[in-house]
Image (spheres, coloured by chain):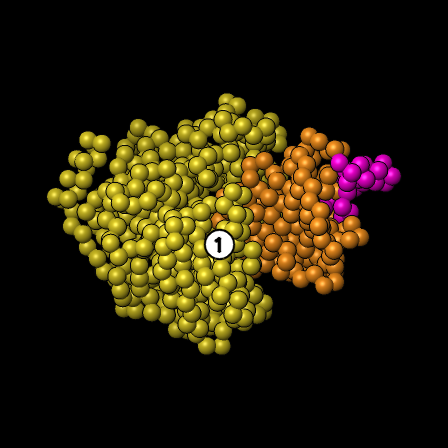
Amino acid sequence: MIKIRKNSLSAYANLRSIAIAGLILGMSLPAMASLGGNISSIDLDRTHMNASEEVTGAGLYSVHRLQVPGGTVVNEYASPGGTIFAVTWQGQFPPDMQQILGVYFQQYSVALAAQAKHYGHQPLNIQSSGLVVQTGGHMRAHWGRVYVQGLIPTRVSADLLQ
Amino acid sequence: MRKLSLAMTTAGLLFVVGCGSNSTNSSTGSGGTTTGSNTMAISVNGGPTANQMNGFIYENAAFASATICVPGSTSNCVTVDNLLVDTGSTGLRVLQSALTSLNLPTIDAANGSPAFDCVSFVDGSFLWGPVQQADVTLGGEVASSLPVHVISASNNVPSSCSNGSSLNENTQSSLGANGILGVGVEPTDCFYQGASVCDPGFGLSNPPAPAYYTCSGNPCIPAFITVAKQVANPVALFPVDNNGVIVELPAVSGSAATLSGSLVFGIGTQSNNRLPSSATIFQLTCDDFTTVFDNQTYGITNPATCVGPGSFIDSGSNGLFFPNATNIPACSSNTPAGDLSSFYCPSSTQSLSAKLEGAAGTSKSADFSVQNAETLFTSSGTESDAALSGLAGLNPSGVGFDWGLPFFYGINLYTSIDGQKTPSGAPASPWWAY
């Protein structure tokens, strides 16, 4: 288990960041990526959200916890191979869904528009071709979870993604 | 203080406390109708579209009216009915179309341009529009110069507000109401944990989003706004009876066509809003409390970061929503009533019990039932009923229990407002009690 804390102003202050800097130099990055993207996109998200970051790593996956100013906590789950397979959040405001969902944003948007309409603001539970989007809560208390079933490492249960 | 004492005396002399007046044969019990200048009638009646051609019933939703006037005027007013009574949000939000020709003054954000508000709901739907000032009368109480959210008829919404959604609830048919009367636990819609991150004084380098905006350029951009100008809980701006509300609704056995009840303003400020000694007070952590159900505990686990599966009581939720610890079958995605996969469909009515816990260790057990939602929505006995006590659905496990309107049937539910003075002997706000 490793635990690293850094803030948005000290982006290259530790070994992990130096490794990521190398990745950035060696590849072209998508303009915006998260779910399904490479672990290196987390730094883009962190900068975009002006967030501080804490990393906890276990054998099956690592969790990159971004604390956004204003109180929302965003957790990005990366597989050992470096792919972000899930993102969760909790806080006063929902996150920028385009930034969280990356290439899955359009699929989310279409599935959301196709949701059955019932009056009342119920929790969301989208299951669309492997993409899962679940939300709940109330004003100033938003919780959500997005993941791609095919990207979750074996032996990891979706229930662990909180 | 002198004003408050006078009002209390007057109310004591003039108003009679009533209880238990029910509108339908199938409703019985302790909740009901209370009278007095600090009360207003509420009705669970299916909402404004229930009686329209091809209109839908808004199940388990309580509606009320408000009179909205240009500040300082008693004649330049519009009375708007069918406002959803919502203890789970804060602020009065009214469809622009329901205000007809009323011309309300704008309110400026901190940068000096007129402010706009964006509210996003957990299901991806959103409300967008200008912040304007009005004198708002609820029952016999007036909130003067109240910042209200006027829901714009336009679909020109900044992308950080719509956030990938096309569910702009800016019409009566999409919202199922003419607006939302948010009388929750906070004084404004950007106040939480004793502070407002939307206020320039909080110290964020950039305004949070989606919240407040200004539109002096195109596109509209997030903006700071001082607490005093934020869309506010109208109750907190009353001169008296301003520390909370009581929602009083009769009990429902199964379902009922309609219900009549009361929204009472103030807690322990009048003879008709005292907190009874039998009531249990649940102090809140991060505006949530804890529910223990089927050996699972749903509450905030880290009060410093407000992380954890919190539980809450919310009249604006139209069912009971909870994680599926007991493996109750979900409904089908293909039913005569449409995709009901987010609701529960047990083969027989499930009688269940949970334990509610406040932050200070108080607790109470709550019995509830879960009925087959497809049957409720499609059988001839219940399909036209507005009050469905057994309507329940799935919450993801990261969220706890959402005790929606069915929880309110048969009780008087007290919601105290953060920062407001509570009755002597009661703990500091915010809390729920019943």
Name the residue at 48% across, 54% down. Answer: B299
Residue extending farthest to the top is: B112
What is the quadrant of the C terminus of chain B in the image?
bottom left
Looking at the picture, tell me which residue is in the foreground, B132 or A139.
A139
The quadrant where residue B386 appears: bottom left
Measured as percent of width and height from the top left, residue B305 is found at: 54, 43
Give the residue drawn at x 58%, y 44%.
A94
Q: Give the magenta part as a residue range.
A: A14-40
Q: Residues within 10 Å of mark 1 (few under 14, many from 20)?
A: many
**Residue A16 on the magenta segment:** yes
Label 1 belongs to which residue?
Answer: B299
Residue A78 in the magenta stretch? The answer is: no
Give the image location of residue B158, x and y in percent: 60, 37
Q: How many marks?
A: 1
Q: Is residue B65 visible?
A: no
Can you name the residue that lies furthest to the front here? A1
Report the residue that reaches farthest toward the right: A26
What hue represents chain B? yellow
Instruction: Say above or below: B114 vs B179.
Output: above
Q: Which chain corresponds to the colour orange? A: A
Which image quarter is the N terminus of chain B in? top left
Q: Quadrant of residue B239?
A: top left
Asked if one can make out residue A143 in the rendered structure from this viewpoint, the answer is: yes
From this view, report whether residue B322 is shown above or below residue B327.
Answer: above
The amino acid type of the residue labelled 1 equals: Gly
Q: Secondary structure at mark 1?
A: loop
Q: Position of residue B340 (x, y in %)?
A: 54, 65
Residue sitting at x 74%, y 59%:
A153
Furthest toward the left, the residue is: B13
Point out residue B157 in the picture as x, y percentages from the top left corner: 58, 39
Write the residue at 44% across / 73% down: B350
The chain carrying label 1 is B
